Amino acid sequence: MIERMPHPDGRVKAMRLTRKGRRVLDVARPLWAHAQDKVLGELGTSAWNDAQRRLARLLHVAVEKRRLRRDRMRKPVRA
């Protein structure tokens, strides 16, 4: 459903959807939209916005924690 494609920078792993992948995505999008509408209807706009805000904050914390850990591992140990 996805395939590698050439990229001038060999470090880049470029991908693209195959025809089958495009068809599956075309079927999935309206189903996903329906599911989102249903959740939004159940939660209400305020709760939905609050959930999105909290999830964005959680993602930010996780990314920052990973960056700090990676930075610590790169620093040479002082004797």
Image (tube, helix red, strand yellow):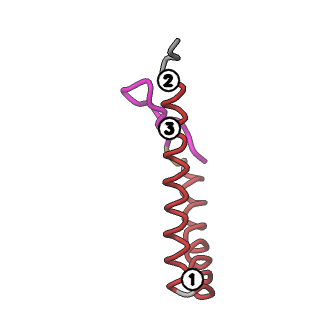
Q: Of discs 3 and 1, which sits in the foreground? A: 3
Residue at 54 percent across and 26 percent down: it is: 73
Mark 3 neighbour class, 10 Å CA radius: few under 14, some 14 to 19, many 20 or more: few
Near-viewer residue (45 or 25): 45
User: What residue did someone put label 3 on?
Assistant: 68
Q: Given the image, on which type of amino acid does mark 3 rest?
A: Leu
Q: Position of residue 38 (x, y in %)?
A: 61, 83
46 w.r.t. 13: above or below: below
Q: Residue reaching furthest front?
A: 79
Q: Residues within 10 Å of mark 1 (few under 14, many from 20)?
A: some
Of the pair 30 and 68, the residue shown nearer to us: 68
Residue 8 is left or right of residue 49, and the answer is left
Residue 72 in picture, x, y percent from top left: 51, 29
What are the residue bounds of the magenta stretch?
Answer: 1-15
Above or below, 49 relative to 22: below
| Residue 7 is covered by the magenta coloring | yes
Q: Position of residue 63 (x, y in %)?
A: 51, 47
Element type at mark 3: helix
Instruction: Check disc 2 and give the amino acid type.
Output: Arg
Amino acid type, mark 1: Leu
Disc number placed over residue 74 in the picture, else none: 2
Q: Which mark is residue 40?
A: 1
Above or below: residue 11 compared with residue 33: above
Q: Secondary structure at mark 2?
A: helix
